[in-house]
Image (cartoon, grey):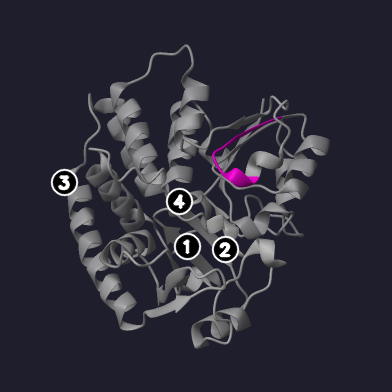
Amino acid sequence: MKKLLLTHSDLDGVGCAIVALHYHFYSDHIYFADYTELNDGVLTSQPFYRSKPWTMFDYIRTFDLVFVTDLSIDPPFYEFLSKEVKNFTILDHHDSSSFIPKEDSRLILDNNKSGTRLLFEYLSAGKRVPVALQEFVEIVDTYDMWKKDSPLWATAEKLNGIFYQMRNYNAKGYYKYSDYIKVQLGKIAKWEHFDFTAIEEKHAEKDIEKKQRNLSKAYDNIQYREDTHGKKFALTSIPASLSYVASVILDDDESLDYIVIVNTYREAKGKISLRSKEMDCTLLNHANGHKLASGGELSDQEIIDLISGKMYSLGYKEDNGTDI
């Protein structure tokens, strides 16, 4: 049976790939999806040569069994899976998947677990599990679920930094993450407990330096505003270290309800990230994902208007989706 893992491209999504590979998925049957691709968009990483580029739906149709992990899917994508894919399982922890009927056994939804943990529990049931794999899953879960009070938080934040340092930004598809994946699988297979290699420790040091640079950049262009519901937020723009920078700024200023960060990295054009300590960010226009950690996408003009103040805030979905 030809199996596909369709997953996200962050620490949690790639964690799902590591779990899948440990349980004998093929690396060329793992696709790290961008949200622009999901509803039959043209694949940014073409898996095979064709005279006509593959779309997401073309690609999915070539598989007998599909696992969708750590992706916030919408009704059109779910409808496609239901109509055209005989066997699929969605393992998710985003509130946006709650539209799927609870009686649909193909959905495993748990807002309290990361995608990596959900897939691990699904694939490891009844099997012997290496301690190092259990520890890896726990660390990824700690970071993705933003468990800052956990004794594993420092290790989880370190792993996330190493993940981004080891990404090959000149590659596409699986090969963008293959070095990181290979190292984690090797440790899980050979080490009794999960830890970091000497090379990973050097990556962690570089990540700390990068975070400090981006924090300085963020404060150089930060703006403080109040939205239409009276919530105070910060707005800034940086190319990397978004979660770390957001966390520091929110900790530094307790009057802030949330922060909006415009991602200026070239491959993330138009993307924004939202973070908060308590407020549900998904109430805001363009924001999807977790309540305390969401993301979205704006047009080039919307980005310009947001930074200039012409679009002073994102607005709320309940207010007829109006940006003000």
Q: What is the secondary structure assignment of the residue under circle 1?
A: strand
Where, by quadrant of the figure, is residue 35 drawn?
Answer: bottom right
In this rendered view, identify the residue nearer to me: 263 or 192.
263
Q: What is the secondary structure assignment of the residue under circle 3?
A: helix
Q: Which residues are magenta?
A: 88-96
- In this view, the mark in front (2 or 4): 2
Q: Residue reaching furthest top?
A: 126
Whether 3 is among the magenta residues is no
Q: Residue at x 25, y 38 (%)?
A: 152
In this rendered view, identify the residue nearer to me: 69 or 2.
69
Find the distance from the CA under tag 3 to the CA under tag 2.
Answer: 36 Å
**Residue 58, can we see it?**
no
| Residue of label 1 | 274
| Residue of label 4 | 10
Q: Amino acid at mark 1?
A: Leu
Q: Amino acid at mark 3?
A: Ala
